[in-house]
Amino acid sequence: MRKIVTVVGARPQFIKAATLSRQFPTVGVEEIIIHTGQHFDNNMSDVFFEEMEIPRPAYHLDIHNLTHGAMTGRMLEGIEKILLKEKPDGMLVYGDTNSTLAGALAAVKLNIPVIHVEAGLRSFNMEMPEEINRTLTDRISSLLFCPTDVAVQNLKREGFEHFPARIIKNGDVMQDAALYYASKAEEKSDILQKIGGEKFVLATIHRQENTDHPEKLRNIVEGLNQIHRQVRVIVPLHPRTRKILQQLSIIPNFTIIEPVGYFDMIVLEKSCELIITDSGGVQKEAFFFGKHCITLREQTEWIELVENGFNILVGSDVEKLLQAFATFQNKKSDFSIDLYGNGHAAEKAAKDIAAF
Ligand code: UDP
């Protein structure tokens, strides 16, 4: 494979793409990046390109703030036009957003092989937009890079061994990013000076399964308010969540800050007491930086974190959240187990992509 087109659009994809983009010149792959525009604010997009030195996208589709169908449809149309012009040998997509599905679908319809990084993950909850996107993307991919054994097993259970697709367990590229950027982050970030020296719990909330259910969102805010009375809770708040809290007139007591760049986020994760989140990526980063995590969801795709006692799933139940918080306050864990490949996932994937 010589020339690939990569589609990114949302914050976690910039972080994942940074790891592979850095590898491609070393294996002789030319990469052309399309940014769909799904995330567009400076602090949700540009900051990641700058800090992580991701090559500038050759194309920017500027598609955002639309319903799922309209957004995916317009992306599909925009990406197809670019593919017809660029004629790449492969399409690289990451994770589980509308941009992932649109990129994969546009390519496969033109018989361009699709490469999916973060394949095989399942929450088994088809009400989640992410589950729909990742399941469909996997099915139309030719090269499936799985971060974990569980992801490989999921694909096998769904019959993927009988499809014309290659399954490769390469590890988790987000661990590559966390390890590579950790010391740079320490050097560059001044977030701890900005927030002050107190002990704190770090929390994030943005998943539609929470933000689009007022009752769940109220419960989560109530739980975080209660924890905040014991230890300061800091939430870099996703713009969608901020908007919905305003619409519902929910006024949290905990400390809200603007979404932060990756370097600040790493430093917050390394310095906090504990992490509470509904994010997929942040659950793993908690583990990478040796922190326990309480997950504000009923399921997780990163089940090995729960099985090894690093993560507790509480959904939006206030009592369970407080119980998990109490459990982790007295718990010490050894985080040295290798669950995600210890930082070599992108290197391996880039070599396999070059040879494909
Ligand atoms: N992140 C960040 N700044 C923030 C919140 C999150 O840089 O204010 C990073 C976080 O460190 C992780 C990624 O964004 O690498 C996770 O993305 P997000 O939670 O948006 O999506 P998910 O992982 O749930 O798909």
Image (spheres, rainbow, N blue to C red):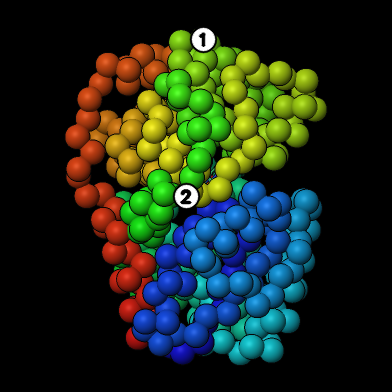
What type is the residue that disc 1 sits on? Arg
Q: Is residue 15 above or below residue 228?
A: below
Residue 13 in view: no
**Vertical position of residue 14 compared to residue 105: above or below:** above
x and y percentages locating residue 252 in the rendered image? 65, 19
Locate the C terminus by quadrant. Answer: bottom left
Image position of 183 (left or right of 242): left
Q: Amino acid at mark 2?
A: Lys
Q: Residues within 10 Å of mark 1 (few under 14, many from 20)?
A: few
Number of labels in the image equals 2
Choose top left, top right, bottom left or bottom right for residue 330. Answer: top left
Counting from the top left corner in percent of width and height, residue 241 is at: 68, 34
How many residues crowd mark 2 within 10 Å: few (<14), some (14–19), many (20+)? few
The reply to whether residue 91 is in sight is yes
Query: Foreground: 187 or 218?
Result: 187
Task: Work out how far the residue at label 2 is from the one at label 1, CA to CA, in angstroms.
Answer: 31 Å
SS at circle 2: helix
On the image, the x and y values in percent for residue 2 come to: 46, 89
Label 1 sits on a secondary structure element that is loop
Q: Nearer the viewer, mark 2 or mark 1?
A: 2
Q: Residue at x 68, y 65 (%)?
A: 36
Compared to residue 347, the image places residue 254 above or below, namely above
Q: Is residue 261 left or right of residue 165?
A: right
Q: Is residue 25 left or right of residue 225?
A: left
Q: Which mark is residue 188?
A: 2
Q: Quadrant of residue 157?
A: bottom left
Query: Residue 300's x, y, as percent?
Result: 43, 40
Which of the two residues, 136 or 3, is positioned nearer the viewer here? 3
- Which numbered dot is residue 229? 1
Q: Nearer the viewer, residue 142 or 284?
A: 284
Observer-nearest of 46 and 204: 46
Marks 2 & 1, CB-CB < 8 Å contact: no
